[in-house]
Amino acid sequence: MTSQITFDAPVVIGKINSGSQLYIALINAGTLKSEPGFEPAVDAQVLFGTDHFKVTDDMKYVTIDVKAALK
């Protein structure tokens, strides 16, 4: 799968229980396409969504959690 998205600047939410810093970015447009031969074939438009990401204190690791509505 290949995804291209545009999103607003991230908003800093703050530290969470794990010690990581939480950010949220609003996704406002994009596309999601499957590679040739992938089943089921996907060729979708991203309507909107959010990207929640956590950055560890040492800035070595980032965990992303993307949720989006596709058409």
Image (cartoon, rainbow, N blue to C red):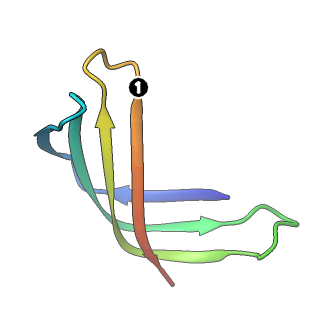
Residue 69: quarter of image? bottom left
Q: Is residue 33 above or below residue 70?
A: above
Q: Quadrant of the N terminus?
A: bottom right
Q: Position of residue 34 (x, y in %)?
A: 72, 65
Q: Residue furthest bottom?
A: 71
Residue shown at 77% from the left, 61% from the top: 35
Q: Position of residue 32 (x, y in %)?
A: 58, 67
Q: Residues within 10 Å of mark 1 (few under 14, many from 20)?
A: few
Q: Is residue 19 left or right of residue 54?
A: left
Q: Is residue 12 left or right of residue 18?
A: left
Residue closer to the observer: 51 or 19: 19
Q: Secondary structure at mark 1?
A: loop
Q: Position of residue 47 (x, y in %)?
A: 40, 77
Write down the residue under mark 1: 61
Q: Position of residue 4 (x, y in %)?
A: 52, 57
Residue shown at 13% from the left, 42% from the top: 12
Residue shown at 44% from the left, 59% from the top: 5
Residue closer to the observer: 1 or 15: 15
> What type is the residue that disc 1 sits on?
Tyr
Q: Residue furthest top?
A: 58
Q: Is residue 8 above or below residue 71?
A: above
Residue closer to the observer: 53 or 70: 53
Q: Is residue 49 left or right of residue 8?
A: right
Q: Residue furthest front?
A: 17
Residue 29: quarter of image? bottom left
Residue closer to the observer: 37 or 29: 37
Q: Is residue 8 above or below residue 15?
A: below
Q: Total of numbered circles in the picture?
A: 1
Residue shown at 84% from the left, 64% from the top: 36
